[in-house]
Image: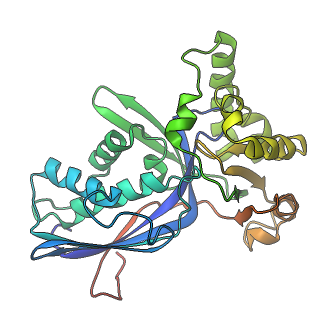
Amino acid sequence: MGSAEAVRIRVPATSANLGPAFDCAGLALSCWDSVDVAVTDAGLDVRVEGIGAGELPTDESHLLVQAFRAACAELGWTPAGLRLTARNGIPQGRGMGSSAAAVTAGVLAAWSLCPDVAGVDDAAVLRLCSQIEGHPDNVAPCLLGGATLSWTTAAGARAERLTVDQRVAPVLFVPATTLSTHLARGLLPATVPHADAAHAAGRSALLVHALTRDPGLLLEATEDRLHQAQRAPAMPESAALLTRLRADGHAAVVSGAGPCVLALAVLAHDEHAGDPGSAAEVRALRARTPEDWQCLPLRVDHTGAVVSPLVDDHDAVSF
């Protein structure tokens, strides 16, 4: 697809960690950013709509532009000019993978528009996105969709996609406040007790089975000892909500570094084909939404990032 002069890229929100699988698991969610990127004769034109409009930079410091430039450098390509319009639907600074979405979109745009490549190399895109982000737990589900397991080798990041059981319904609780990922990481201890490491390994293995085969085990599978309690002082309202939801039997976790809280509802067999917001457990979760928070009943995004050639300023044709 390197012959295209303009593309539209849709990238999903993501939730990393999912409780015990710290830095190695993530889930793609049905909340998206959409970005139009076009090669022009000269200059840089960046426009931001939706979330972050009027707040995010519109110059070379925009994360999308930085990721695009990094990918161009790896490909050995320098476009004359660039026009970029970002329509943001992913809340930022709340543990929903907004930075991973921007990085993924920027790198995919370069791969899709570069005239010297025949198509997008997902493995190379994952490696570069992970280098820019620092770890692959959000970029992997953003790129591949579904749930992902990711790890890093001497050659770079790798990931495998899992097909999530159709009864799993993500419900996201979004506070008005934000939390810096850097600050949240700074609260983690340098070492953990052997018993806690063993607990994380066992629960992470169980999490794979629960997500793909037996969602009834999600409450136990999402038990964490590595990071959520350690980060609680930075987000006391999130920690309190998490405690209440789990005490009520809901498989709730801190989404990424927080402060969003993600609950993995389990739909009945006759509920998964309809609106997840009408399912019994989802209704029960919505009733527990704290004041001034948003509750977003979502679906798992099974597709991941989608690139479409942009025919004109208004239409994109999927392929």
Res 77 seen here: yes
Q: Is residue 75 left or right of residue 197?
A: left
Q: In this view, does 296 lie to the left or right of 107?
A: right
Q: Quadrant of residue 158?
A: top left
Q: Quadrant of residue 310?
A: bottom left
- Residue 18 x, y percent position in the rendering: 64, 41
Q: Which residue is drawn at 59% across and 28% down?
A: 187
Q: Which residue is drawn at 82% across and 58% down?
A: 290
Towards the viewer: 174 or 52: 52
Q: Is residue 157 left or right of residue 234?
A: left
Q: In this view, does 57 lie to the left or right of 141?
A: left
Asked if residue 70 is positioned above or below residue 149 in the image, the reply reads below
Q: Which colour scheme is used?
A: rainbow
Asked if residue 318 is positioned above or below residue 148 in the image, the reply reads below
- Residue 147 x, y percent position in the rendering: 55, 48
Q: Residue furthest top?
A: 194
Asked if residue 26 is positioned above or below residue 69 in the image, the reply reads above
Q: Quadrant of residue 72?
A: bottom left
- Residue 202 x, y percent position in the rendering: 67, 24
- Residue 313 x, y percent position in the rendering: 30, 87
